[in-house]
Image (cartoon, rainbow, N blue to C red):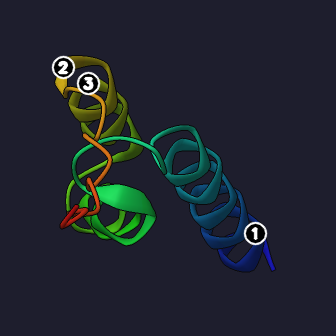
Amino acid sequence: MHFIVHISLYLLLCLVIALIGRHRKLTFWGYFLACIIFTPLIGMVLVIASDPRIPKKEDDDD
């Protein structure tokens, strides 16, 4: 029973960190997987250290 609670809290923390980083370079899925593979602490460091994502510009041929 305790194992399920710990896994649920771990995944919830990974989800929160991924939501924080969804507008950064690695996007939501990149940070979510980084949190799962490493730890949520490392994932948060990655979010803080990364740059914001640059929006794509549409080419206007005028």
Q: Amino acid at mark 3?
A: Val
- The image quadrant where one finds the C terminus is bottom left
Whether the residues at callouts 2 and 3 have beta carbons within 8 Å, the answer is yes
Q: At which x and y percent is residue 41?
A: 35, 32
- What number is the disc on residue 49? 2
Tell me which numbered mark, 2 or 1, is placed earlier along the sequence.
1
- Whether residue 31 is visible to the viewer of this picture, yes or no, is no
Query: Which residue is at the front of the view, 51 or 4?
Result: 51
From mark 2 to mark 1, how far is it between C-alphas? 33 Å
Residue at image location 45% in from the left, 44% down from the top: 23
Residue of label 3: 45
- 19 displayed left or right of 9: left
Q: Amino acid at mark 2?
A: Ala
- Whether residue 47 is visible to the viewer of this picture, yes or no, is yes
From mark 3 to mark 1, how far is it between C-alphas? 27 Å
Residue at image location 60% in from the left, 50% down from the top: 19
- What number is the disc on residue 2? 1
